Image (cartoon, rainbow, N blue to C red):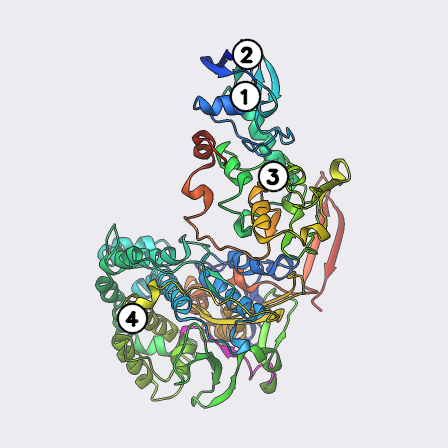
């Protein structure tokens, strides 16, 4: 069923039930996302896709479109709110882009550029997060985790469908964990997929590092906005 | 009554320094100290990072000779993963040549920056000239054509770096066992033919001779002053190949004395057996020395002057630089040259040498080949690596250790400016002595201040790289309340 909605005052037709992020992209409007992966169930954890729906702030990836919705994506207030959310992610972790091998391929970094973030308005917390390198092929760099939970939900043991990653603890004590036994069973291509799925440089494939030259890295070849608007898996 | 003269800050060097000259009642200079007042800490905060991040993170110590730091780290990682020189494994030709190309490009642009932007104004206008004139802007007014050539030369060097590392500064190319890309034919052609806003390789070789001409003019007019300015003794050290010629990327560490006798020659992996470092509570920069020769006698000079002193010759493929080097060697009749301002002569020779070496490489088809990485065999991991290269300012060393999981547990960087610490202090004292020694009405003139700075600047010191004291270091910490009053104070002496 088709419904009519407005995005930033523009009336568009959309298929009922599609989420706002996808509908906006189909109509050439980019909404930044970090936890959402097109084609997979929405997680709604990062809130980076926040928009105003009929005046209320909501995470666009979690909201199916309905007839008559008025969606504010690029208004000043909501744009700054999204920027603040990205800044908070930078302030909470310890993100050192210059030496991070995910640089150029990192969705958080690319989104930071998209929301025009220069520096966080919030004080950086500099909380130490111990790395976990017990797994044979995965280096877990907790300093960079943004708790998107992509790995928790979408990376599973091929045999048992058990989760390999999990979040342990709550609030500021939360941390990403890895089941080393299951991780050690992961075939090489699944390790690479997990590292690619991680929007930041938290899940690092130990067998690869800085293998893609500067200028040829994912978001240098095609920006995160172009990828989002171009359809398909980002 | 003893007096203390202070010059703070010393300008037109990389980083910040302070000079203190002490005089006694008889108006004799009793001591002179170059204080390095910055503190960095790279050796500490790399710990806990995965080993493969070291060359990427530690190159950020410097915005000038970052390629040297990157390559030094990469060589250490080659060792660590089991495909480095410590394991007797020769590097594949393409990655080694790609690394060398970036290194020579950096040496070219670094030397051009130091020489023309910082040093030539001193030569052209004289040490007593007003600071307003004695700078690169004054140079633009005095000789705009020269400056245009210098800017073009520097740009070409920087684009050479970018062609390999992807960025003009802090790019990434070297990874354990090799490189992540070769030099594309397109990038090679651009550097050779001078397309897209670049000068051509032939122009580079032409422009690279400007530095020598400037030095010769200056030297011819001021021979006595230049030669007598801060002639200070020191051993000379650099990496050499099997022929005893300088090798900026790899070789043995050779140390020679005034008569060019080889007093030590070592595999740099054994540096801890040969070198020790002294510390002083008045400086964050340490004082390395050869253990067997003691703190004073065992201090070495590194950098352009040391390299042209140590090298027997240059390869025939670099004829212009080779001829310039022979003239340099003839000047001191086979002895090592201790004249501080001749460092600038040596730097001008190396500008040309870098350009000619790049010419050789850019005509080598190996740079476009695809065999880029040497993969270690199972159980090749050594967990430890040492890398040494000849950075523009001299011999640079990175030493890392990592645990079995790949976590960096130890890092030691011995940078060129640190090696030069003692000889720089000797230079400062020599200058102060010649200006102030024995004079009843000793006063700090602009000329003295300039002369001390000129002496230091000859080393092109990179104080920002050189300050990374380990363990106990001299540190004062104060806590002030909102009213400006001190709440707490802690002072710690050097261990």
**Mark 2 and 1 residues: CB-CB less than 8 Å, in contact?**
yes
Q: Which mark is residue B360?
A: 4
Q: Residues within 10 Å of mark 3 (few under 14, many from 20)?
A: many
- Give the CA separation, mark 2 to mark 1: 10 Å
Find residue B90 and report its horizontal and vertical position in percent: 46, 75
Q: Quadrant of the N terminus of chain B?
A: bottom right
Q: If you read the primary sequence from the N terminus, does the residue marked by circle 3 or circle 2 appear first? A: 2
**Mark 4 and 1 residues: CB-CB less than 8 Å, in contact?**
no
Name the subunit of mark 1. Answer: A
Name the residue beneath numbered marker 3. A90
- Give the CA separation, mark 4 to mark 3: 46 Å
The answer, for residue B57, to whether it is visible in the render is yes
Name the residue beneath numbered marker 2. A69
State the residue in front, B5 or A139.
A139
Q: Residues within 10 Å of mark 1 (few under 14, many from 20)?
A: many
**Above or below — where is B188 with respect to A38?**
below
Magenta region: B294-304
**Above or below — where is B489 with respect to A11?**
below
Secondary structure type for disc 2: loop
**Mark 4 and 3 residues: CB-CB less than 8 Å, in contact?**
no
Residues marked 1 and 3, same chain: yes
Q: Which image quadrant is residue B164 in?
A: bottom left
- Give the CA separation, mark 4 to mark 1: 59 Å
Q: Residues within 10 Å of mark 4 (few under 14, many from 20)?
A: few
Name the subunit of mark 3. Answer: A
Name the residue beneath numbered marker 1. A20
Q: Which mark is residue B484?
A: none
Tell me the mark number nearer the camera, choosing from 1 and 3. Answer: 1
Residues marked 4 and 3, same chain: no
Residue shown at 36%/78% (left/top)?
A: B227
**Above or below — where is A40 with respect to B360?**
above
Find residue A206 and report its horizontal and vertical position in percent: 59, 56
């Amino acid at each position: 069923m088709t419904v009519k909605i407005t995005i930033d005052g523009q009336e568009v037709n959309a298929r009922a039930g599609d989420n706002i992020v996808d509908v906006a992209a189909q109509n050439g409007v980019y909404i930044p996302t970090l936890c959402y992966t097109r084609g997979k169930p929405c997680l709604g954890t990062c809130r980076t896709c926040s928009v105003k729906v009929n005046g209320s702030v909501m995470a666009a990836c979690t909201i199916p479109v309905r007839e008559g919705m008025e969606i504010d994506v690029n208004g000043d207030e909501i744009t700054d709110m999204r920027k603040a959310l990205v800044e908070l992610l930078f302030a909470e972790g310890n993100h050192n882009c210059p030496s991070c091998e995910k640089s150029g391929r990192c969705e958080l970094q690319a989104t930071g550029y998209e929301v025009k973030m220069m520096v966080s308005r919030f004080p950086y917390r500099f909380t130490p997060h111990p790395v976990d390198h017990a797994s044979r092929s995965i280096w877990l760099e907790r300093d960079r985790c943004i708790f998107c939970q992509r790995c928790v939900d979408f990376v599973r043991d091929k045999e048992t469908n058990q989760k390999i990653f999990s979040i342990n603890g709550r609030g500021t004590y939360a941390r990403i964990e890895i089941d080393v036994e299951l991780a050690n069973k992961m075939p090489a291509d699944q390790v690479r997929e997990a590292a690619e799925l991680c929007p930041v440089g938290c899940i690092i494939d130990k067998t690869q590092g800085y293998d893609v030259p500067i200028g040829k890295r994912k978001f240098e070849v095609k920006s995160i906005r172009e990828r989002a608007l171009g359809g398909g898996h980002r | 009554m003893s007096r203390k003269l202070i010059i703070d800050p010393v300008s037109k060097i990389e980083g910040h320094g302070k000079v203190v000259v002490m005089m006694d009642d008889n108006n004799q200079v009793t001591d002179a100290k170059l204080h390095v007042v910055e503190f960095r800490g790279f050796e500490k905060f790399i710990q806990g990072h995965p080993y493969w991040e070291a060359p990427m993170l530690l190159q950020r110590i410097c915005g000038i000779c970052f390629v040297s730091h990157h390559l030094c780290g990469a060589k250490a990682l080659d060792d660590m993963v089991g495909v480095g020189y410590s394991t007797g494994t020769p590097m594949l030709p393409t990655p080694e040549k790609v690394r060398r190309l970036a290194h020579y490009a950096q040496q070219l642009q670094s030397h051009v920056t130091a020489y023309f932007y910082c040093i030539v104004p001193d030569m052209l206008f004289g040490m007593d000239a007003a600071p307003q004139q004695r700078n690169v802007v004054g140079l633009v007014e005095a000789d705009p054509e020269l400056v245009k050539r210098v800017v073009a030369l520097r740009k070409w060097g920087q684009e050479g770096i970018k062609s390999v590392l992807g960025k003009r500064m802090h790019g990434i190319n070297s990874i354990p066992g090799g490189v992540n890309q070769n030099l594309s034919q397109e990038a090679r052609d651009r550097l050779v033919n001078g397309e897209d806003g670049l000068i051509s390789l032939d122009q580079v070789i032409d422009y690279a001779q400007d530095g020598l001409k400037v030095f010769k003019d200056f030297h011819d007019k001021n021979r006595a002053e230049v030669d007598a300015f801060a002639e200070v003794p020191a051993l000379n050290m650099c990496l050499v190949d099997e022929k005893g010629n300088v090798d900026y990327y790899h070789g043995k560490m050779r140390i020679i004395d005034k008569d060019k006798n080889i007093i030590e020659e070592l595999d740099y992996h054994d540096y801890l057996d040969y070198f020790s470092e002294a510390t002083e509570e008045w400086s964050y920069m340490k004082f390395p020395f050869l253990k067997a020769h003691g703190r004073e006698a065992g201090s070495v000079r590194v950098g352009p002057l040391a390299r042209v002193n140590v090298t027997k010759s240059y390869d025939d493929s670099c004829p212009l630089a080779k001829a310039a080097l022979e003239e340099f060697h003839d000047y001191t009749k086979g002895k090592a040259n201790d004249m501080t301002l001749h460092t600038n002569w040596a730097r001008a020779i190396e500008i040309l040498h870098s350009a000619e070496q790049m010419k050789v490489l850019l005509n080598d088809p190996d740079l476009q080949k695809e065999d880029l990485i040497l993969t270690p065999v199972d159980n090749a991991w050594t967990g430890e690596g040492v890398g040494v290269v000849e950075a523009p300012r001299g011999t640079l060393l990175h030493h890392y250790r990592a645990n079995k999981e790949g976590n960096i547990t130890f890092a030691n960087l011995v940078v060129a400016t640190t090696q030069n610490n003692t000889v720089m202090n000797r230079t400062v004292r020599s200058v102060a002595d010649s200006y102030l020694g024995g004079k009843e009405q000793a006063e700090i003139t602009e000329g003295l201040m300039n002369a001390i700075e000129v002496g230091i600047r000859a080393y092109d010191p990179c104080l920002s790289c050189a300050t990374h004291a380990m363990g106990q270091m001299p540190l004062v910490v104060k806590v002030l309340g909102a009213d400006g009053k001190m709440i707490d104070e802690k002072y710690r002496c050097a261990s």
